[in-house]
Image (cartoon, rainbow, N blue to C red):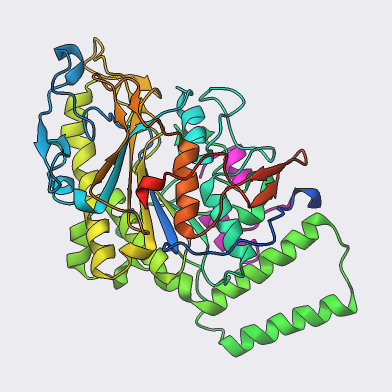
Amino acid sequence: MFAGNLQRQLIHRRPFLQSGLAGLLGGVLGPLSWLPQAAASNARAGKAKAVILIFNGGAPSHIDLWDPKPSAPSEMRGIFKPIGTNVAGIQVTELLPRMARRMDKVALVRSVHHQHSSHNGGMHWANVGRPYRVDSTLINPSRTDLPGVGTLVGWLAQRDGFSPGIPPYVITPFPTCDSKLYITPGQDGACLGAKFAPFVLDDDPNAADFKVRGMAMNEAISSGRFQERLDLLKEFSQVSPPFISEQSLEFEESRKQAAGILQSGRAAAAFDLSKEPDSVREKYGRHSWGQSHLLARRLVEAGTRYVTTVNGPSITWDTHKDNFNALQNRLVPPMEQAYAALLDDLEERGLLETTLVVWMGEFGRTPKINADAGRDHWPGCYSVLLAGGGVRGGQVIGASDSIGALPAERPVSPADIHASMYAALGYDPKNIWYQSNDGRPMPLTEGSVIGELF
């Protein structure tokens, strides 16, 4: 269990299940003036129904994975050789043989950049699309924060009548953070209120005893008896109306959501990985990352709109030391196995066209190799991959310079990635607004859709 602000800002599995009434998305709603406002006309025409974000906390080296630089000086290019892919003209490094066979499904953006070089600051910019007020790792969420993409997609889903039978926004297995002490702002409900916070798994889905308990009704209580209890509670409320406050309204909303989840049974079924054949679980990999990716597929199949699956824990990809051994022996094999399996599984089930899969970290890593055979933080240029959801695969968008330090063609911001995610879902990112904590109307993002993707 995380401490401090995380306990106040993110929804945790155990407290939620213990309370029974806390609500899957609930907490304490802020002042009513924080409630989001939307434009009146937002016709949805995108192909995607859901997003899976694969987030690599700590930041993978773009040069050693997706953007090889074989002609760069030896102190920059690294030890991994480029290999061809199933798309003529696109190369990745030899660490990615599975993905090399699947590049026809993927659009590779090689010119993403921003200006925050600390982990939490970079994670905020990558997930919210805007700079945090300070570029620091030592930050935590607050109600004054702007929401990230997952929060806003969950809000849009609820605004559009999303069923409460399953959470619209889930993070597995743990939220993005630095050492679990400093939690990235924006991935919770932020200024929209705790009602729109995600369900955070806060557990290892590969554990032998993994089970999200409390998602289904007690077997001793029938559905009819449970409904009778709800009706009785409603009668009590009518006889003795409660004191009305923002907190009481939020509590009531949370109770309704919790009841909806228990009565539906959809969430309990989606989180039950034991329903998957062993062969499928092995294909994804019997490790936390693989089972989190499998869980993401099950969730979007059941109706969840946004799943962040974090290849962590914490800043696992922070390879200041021994970068090459860490990538080759510890980090890339489970990541690539899970990523490739997810794309294949979605395609085989007919879900890839309606599920946008985004792969990213908070930034890239320095072109120059340091004295510890590592690479340091580098937001100046890095790579992001998108697949499914109407995205045209088999292409590279943008380019870095000769050493992978700066965009040389078609610079792209995280906000542009977000605008494209909203467009894939059928939302106009410039004409849908919510209200910030200080009363300002805010568009979903200030970025522009990357037209080449579609």
Q: Quick check: 354 left or right of 166?
A: left
Could one spot residue 310 in this view of the protein? no
**Magenta stretch: includes residue 185:** no
- Closest to the observer: 267 or 346? 346
| Residue 68: % across, % down | 19, 28
Question: Where is residue 73, by image quadrant?
Answer: top left
Name the residue at the top extreme.
371
Say left or right for 244 vs 110.
Answer: right
Residue at 62% of width from left, 45% of height from top? 9
Q: Quadrant of residue 64?
A: top left
Residue 226 percent location from the top left of the image: 62, 83
Is residue 224 left or right of 275 when viewed as pictured?
right
The reply to whether residue 367 is in sight is yes
Q: Position of residue 173 (x, y in %)?
A: 40, 50
**155 to 236, vertically: above or below:** above
On whether residue 20 falls in the magenta region, the answer is yes
Eyeballing the image, is 432 above or below 95?
below
Region in magenta: 1-30
Measuring from the top left, give residue 215's x and y in whole percent.
Answer: 50, 69
* Residue at point 54%, 55% (across, down): 153
Image side of residue 134 versus residue 85, left or right: right
